[in-house]
Image (cartoon, rainbow, N blue to C red):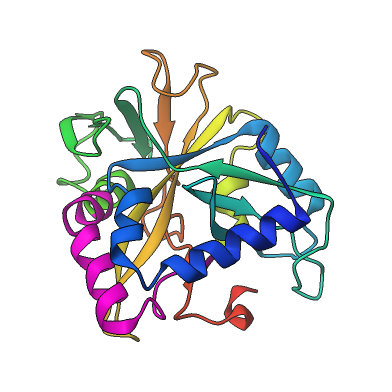
Amino acid sequence: MSILTYENYTTAVKNWAAIKSNYSEIQKIISPEQVFILSREQIEWFDKENEAETYFRADIGVWENQLVLILTPRTSAGDVKTLENYEFATLQFLESDLTLKQTKTYTVTSTYTLTKDLSKGKEDSDLDFPVMNEPITGQLKAIDEIESWKENAMDYLQRESLEFKGQRLFQSFYIPKADLLHDKQNTRDIVCVFGFKYSAVYERLLATLIFISNTTGDKVGAPGAVYAVQPDPSNTYDWSRPIPPYSASTGG
């Protein structure tokens, strides 16, 4: 597991805060096709250390010239716990495609392929009973949001960096616990992918993290590995709230 000391953690967070206003530096550490991968052991550690009831918090940092997602457990009062070590994941490229599978209301099984460069690949649907007509599944919604990030991320980052001096760029994410724990006993790892979600409140696209869990036991991207997001498209499976624009008080 990847570990940062408390001093390393605070340094990494400060590094990202300093880089956000420098687009040329951002280009060196972010590629729209890259993802974070959290192991089962990291998720179990996060859950054990976290005291907040509803949300996890993850901070973005830069460590050893790489963008990192730092798992920062909170106290019951909502403050970040001061620990000797913090788990983190490094932004990286997928080595192979992911197979995403979702079963809807016992009648529709939809399978999609998310290629290793985060493009939407082939899709198949099997209908057991003709009770639904082309349902909009959570999987497809997630893939569309991921593709939106892939196509628009660099333009977004450039504008935020140059026009707004990075002040509106994400520093942290508040993550609903259900996103990481909905199948804790069976999950081997979780792929965390950036996506774009439109906010009617802020009237603009906001970056979010989409969590795709592997419950087959095979390693990330292996031929037998099948990934899934939450089965209910109305669920907040892909709504990890970015800070800014949200404040810490919205995180629960």
Quarter holding the N terminus is top right
Which residue is rendered at x = 69% and y = 32% of the image?
Answer: 41
Measured from the top left, where is residue 46 in percent x and y? 72, 48
Instruction: Determine which quarter of the picture holds residue 196.
Output: bottom left
Residue 171 colored in magenta in the image: yes
Left or right position of 50 against 110: right
- The residue sitting at the top extreme is 223
Measured from the top left, where is residue 4 in percent x and y? 70, 46
Which residue is rendered at x = 24% and y = 30% of the image?
Answer: 115
Instruction: Give the magenta range.
Output: 145-172
Q: Is residue 58 visible?
A: no
Q: Is residue 189 visible?
A: yes
- Seen from the viewer's position, the closer of residues 181 and 231 is 181
- Seen from the viewer's position, the closer of residues 248 and 212 is 248
Q: How many marks?
A: 0
- Seen from the viewer's position, the closer of residues 195 and 60 is 60
Left or right position of 88 against 81: left
Which residue is rendered at x = 35% and y = 23% of the image?
Answer: 95
Which residue is rendered at x = 67% and y = 65% of the image?
Answer: 54
Examine the rendered structure and indicate whether residue 6 appears above or below residue 89.
below
Residue 155 colored in magenta in the image: yes
Tell me the chief SS of the magenta region.
Answer: helix
Measured from the top left, where is residue 22 in percent x and y? 34, 68
Quarter holding the C terminus is bottom right
Examine the rendered structure and indicate whether residue 216 appears above or below residue 213.
above
Instruction: Determine which quarter of the picture holds residue 87.
Output: top right
Examine the rendered structure and indicate whether residue 123 appears above or below residue 171.
above
Left or right position of 21 against 121: right
Measured from the top left, where is residue 213 in percent x and y? 49, 36
Examine the rendered structure and indicate whether residue 81 appears above or below residue 34.
below
- Seen from the viewer's position, the closer of residues 59 and 186 is 59
